[in-house]
Amino acid sequence: MTDSKLKIYLDFAATTPVDGDVFEKMKPYFLEKYGNPASIHSFGQEAQSAVESARNCVADFLNCSAGEVIFTSGATESNNLAIKGVVKAHFLRFPNQKSHLIVSCIEHHCILDSCKSLERDGLAEVTYLSVDKNGLIKLDELDSAIKENTILASVMYANNEVGAIQPIKQIGDMLKDLNIKRQSSKILLHTDATQAINYLNCDVIGLGVDLLSLSGHKIYGPKGVGALFIKKGANITRMQDGGGQEYNLRAGTLNVPGIVGLGEAITQIKSQESKIKIIEKLRNKLVNGVLDAIPDSFLNGSLNSNLPHIANIMLSGAEGEAVLIALDLEGIAVSTASACASRSLKPSHVLTAMGLAGFEAHCSIRFSLGKQTTEAEIDKVLMVLPPIVEKIRKIGGAISKKEQQRLPDDFGC
């Protein structure tokens, strides 16, 4: 094993380290300013003031009012609240009308599973949009999928596995025009912006979204905290019973240190804009270097329509888990899919939706860079990866034709 001081982390899409300044902002709310923000006394009011300050930071970043920001435990909870909360609110108003939802088939599992749960309970019917070879939805397919009982479209801003950036603004414009003409309920637009926050414009007014989910640990903030933007007037109801926290939409004692950290992390994003070009340059060097050095290697998706920090590469004939383990032994951390699904034996539902066969998806590796990534680290990857792939292919770590036929092609949509 490589010395721990030389370890290389290329899994920033799974999680990011907490920024030092973010951590310093959080510390007092663990040790000194530990009041419950729901308490009336000075300790509680001190904590409540910190929460509202962080709320204002998130609102400024999203270009919305502070009253439209709900703090949650992370993007999974935000996505569940967005999807199920809208459907439940519609059901309470129209108990005899089943809702219709439109989602892309490459959403995070917390979106797809929420939709499947609503389908099982008989509360909603769902249309799953296909994607092209670059992981992008087709606007005409979305338009054709709309029905009289459509109440919500949910399309992730940028995909966590391949980095494909969806045309959210165009979708927002389309739905805005359609909603003006509709006699039935307005169609709300939700986007999971978890991967996009660090890199893309997330002005909710400019995008035309009604709901937007984000998470702290993808933006150099702490784990266990996130937020959901809910546009004023959007019809949504709580999913969690208890106290009246978060405008009576999310019960539970607030995670004050985490919220403070999220507020500081999102504030720092604008100061990191200059680093995006550096990250993109290093990502491109990695992609070009791998494709040049390793025969039968292919980029999943397109550099032209992807986030600047993600590269998902298919290494034909070299099983992804074997490559991952070999790289880990060299001190290099990468992944084979999203972290939430990394222990699943099923091929990535994202890659198979993009047209890859199951065995091809199993031969794919995701590299994701961050602001700490250096050129020396990329050079090290380009030095050790080709012989690793060659060795795995030679010793039979590659998937045989028989094994290829046995691998499931189910992509879960």
Image: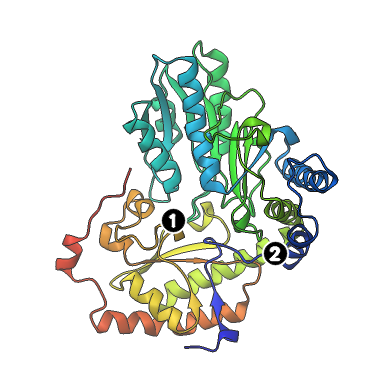
Q: Residue at x 46, y 84 (%)?
A: 330
Can residue 361 be seen?
Answer: yes
Residue 281 to residue 63: above or below: below
Residue 175 falls in image quadrant: top right
Q: Position of residue 341 (x, y in %)?
A: 39, 57
Q: Position of residue 69 (x, y in %)?
A: 68, 38
Q: Which residue is mark 1?
A: 301
Label 2, residues with CA under 10 Å away: few <14, some 14-19, many ≥20: few
Amino acid marked by disc 1: Gly
Q: Residue at x 41, y 61 (%)?
A: 337
Q: Which residue is mark 2?
A: 275
Q: Position of residue 27 (x, y in %)?
A: 76, 63
Residue 247 falls in image quadrant: top right
Residue 391 to residue 91: above or below: below
For the view shown, which residue lies furthest in the top direction?
183
- CA gap, disc 2 and disc 1: 23 Å
Q: Secondary structure at mark 1?
A: loop
Q: Position of residue 329 (x, y in %)?
A: 43, 83
Q: State the mark number for residue 150.
A: none
In the rendered image, the quadrant that contains the C terminus is: top left
Residue 121 to residue 369: above or below: above
Amino acid marked by disc 2: Lys
